[in-house]
Amino acid sequence: MDTKLPPYATLGQRIWFYGFRVLCGLIFFFLIAPILIIIPLSFNAENFFTFTPGMLALDPEAYSLRHYRDFFTNPDWQQALWNSVRIAPVATLLSVSLGTLAAIGLSQSHVPLKGAIMAILISPMIVPLIISAAGMYFFYSRVGLQGTYWGVVLAHAALGIPFVIITVTATLVGFDRSLTRAAANLGANPVTTFFRIQMPLILPGVISGGLFAFITSFDEVVVVIFVGSAAQQTLPWQMFTGLREQISPVILATATILVAVSIILLTVVELLRRRSERLRGMSPS
């Protein structure tokens, strides 16, 4: 996409050039404005969800880290954080393992009904979350997983697998399959070929899918409310409960921390995407 307007552009082209950028800027502001409001509010020295006159006047006394201290010292918030830390990595590991194998299998040309299988595997991204949560609740109730740690982990893994499949499948598009055939001709078995030849080349896509699966698990609240119990109350669940029962700016501090973590993870995803394109001989955009 051209980033500069050519000097010979017509009036209509100039209007479209600048109008398109203004429209994109307005959409970006609409999406980012709630985050920009939450971050300064999390430093409010009072127990309010609004800007105080002192904050608007940039008075240092109106700003404080008290809500962050409350987050790191309150046992309820720390237990919720610990539950999220216990659940998200295990769910991510399952998502990466199963999603990577599924993507490699679906990339084979001889697999029948690949389109239908792919649609089923990525359906958790398409089906409304409340429907998936209700279905998991009734299914888990019958098999004894309702209200258990592994029930929540498996539910989050099911939500993360589509992200892994999509990112790994995109990485496999530019994969040179002559490398695996050459390894097989030299006597390498399929397991050795996968770990020594294929895995290093698709690793950026695997890690990217894993990061998306981790973010999905760490931020998910609807499914865990349905299939979890009080013992599995995660950080988003604690935030939801706080908004419903006891409004506290600690929620804003927690949201700011989650935003910072998400930005870091998405930055890593972008760096991995560029590395993957370089490995495939493409020019990073």
Image (spheres, rainbow, N blue to C red):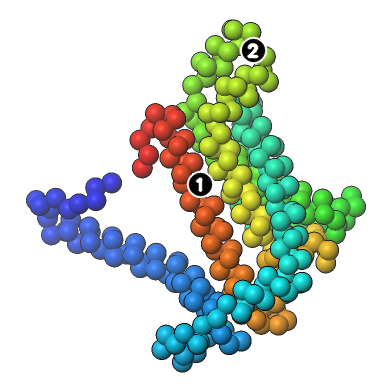
Residue drawn at (61%, 79%), measured in percent from left and top? Answer: 66
Q: Kindly identify the amino acid type of the residue bearing the numbered disc 2.
A: Ala
Mark 2 or mark 1, earlier in chain: 2
* Foreground of the two, 193 or 133: 193
Residue drawn at (52%, 17%), measured in percent from left and top? Answer: 179
Q: Is residue 17 above or below residue 241?
A: above
**Which quarter of the picture shows residue 68?**
bottom right
Extreme-bottom residue of the structure: 53
Q: Kindly identify the amino acid type of the residue bearing the numbered disc 1.
A: Val
Residue drawn at (64%, 60%), measured in percent from left and top? Answer: 219
* Foreground of the two, 131 or 3: 3
Q: Which residue is disc 2 drawn over?
A: 188
Quadrant where the C terminus sits is: top left
Residue 123 visible somewhere in the drawing = no
Q: Which residue is disc 1 drawn over?
A: 269
**Residue 115 appears at what percent x and percent y?**
59, 35
